[in-house]
Amino acid sequence: MVILSSDGNILYKDKWLTKLDETFRDVDTKKATLILRNFLNNNKLGDRGIIVMRDGRMFKNESLEPWQNLHKNDNLTYLEIIKNPTPIIYGSNEQLSPLISFGKSSDGFLCPKWDRRNGLGKTRRIRIRKNPNNYTIEQIAEMLAVTSYQPRLGPHPTLHPSPIYWADGFAGTSDKQLQFRGFS
């Protein structure tokens, strides 16, 4: 779990053991919401809007319920950032926005990174699961595209929004994977 400011600064990180099946169980969600609530209260940020980015899609046995009462103002937006399967976009960078969406859907495909050599755009699917602030899919896509260019361990943007990039990196640190070790 990583908490970032809107400009990409790492404010807090935590890591705990759980089953490795990509399900974020209620016990994990309750732990995450408790950590987040304490962080917000300790830093007097309790009235701020929060955007939670879940790495991957929610599974059937997962629930948004533990997130419902995190904020008394109910200004928590919950997004799924789905890595696979996502389409590859072909065309010209100048003709595309960072988002491809379908009508008034709450789903879209974010295209933060473009390979000019072969006219290929790689995407991530985004799905809005909770949106009390009524952000449009375009506003969310713009924010996610910006996070793909926030600080990281190298000079290049990634396909992943910053919170997912850092959380994946910290979670993967080990005696054999040293890339993020200096931050752990």
Image (cartoon, helix red, strand yellow):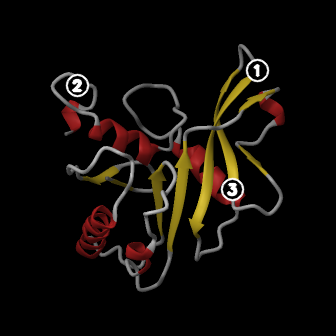
Q: Mark 1 or mark 2: which comes first in sequence?
A: 1
Q: Mark 3 or mark 2: which comes first in sequence?
A: 3
- The quadrant the C terminus occupies is top left
The Cα–Cα distance between marks 1 and 2, rounded to whole angstroms, is 33 Å
Q: Position of residue 181 (x, y in %)?
A: 20, 31
At 65% across and 67% down in the image, what residue appears? 135
In the image, taking residue 61 as reference, residue 33 lies left or right, namely left
In the image, taking residue 112 as reference, residue 17 lies left or right, namely left
Compared to residue 16, the image places residue 133 above or below, namely below
In the image, taking residue 151 as reference, residue 88 lies left or right, namely right
Badge number at residue 119: 1
Badge number at residue 90: none
Instruction: Count residues near mark 3 (Cα–Cα under 10 Å), then give few for <14, some for 14-19, many for 20+.
Output: some
Q: Position of residue 84 (x, y in %)?
A: 57, 38
At 68% across and 45% down in the image, what residue appears? 109
Instruction: Find numbered disc 3 in the image and state the secondary structure of the residue it sits on.
Output: strand
Circle nearer the viewer, 3 or 1: 3
Compared to residue 70, the image places residue 115 above or below, namely above
Q: Quadrant of residue 106?
A: bottom right
Instruction: Find numbered disc 2 in the image and state the secondary structure of the residue it sits on.
Output: loop
At 24% across and 72% down in the image, what residue appears? 38
Residue matched to label 3: 107
Badge number at residue 178: 2
Instruction: Please state which amino acid type lies under the numbered disc 3.
Output: Asp
Circle nearer the viewer, 3 or 2: 3
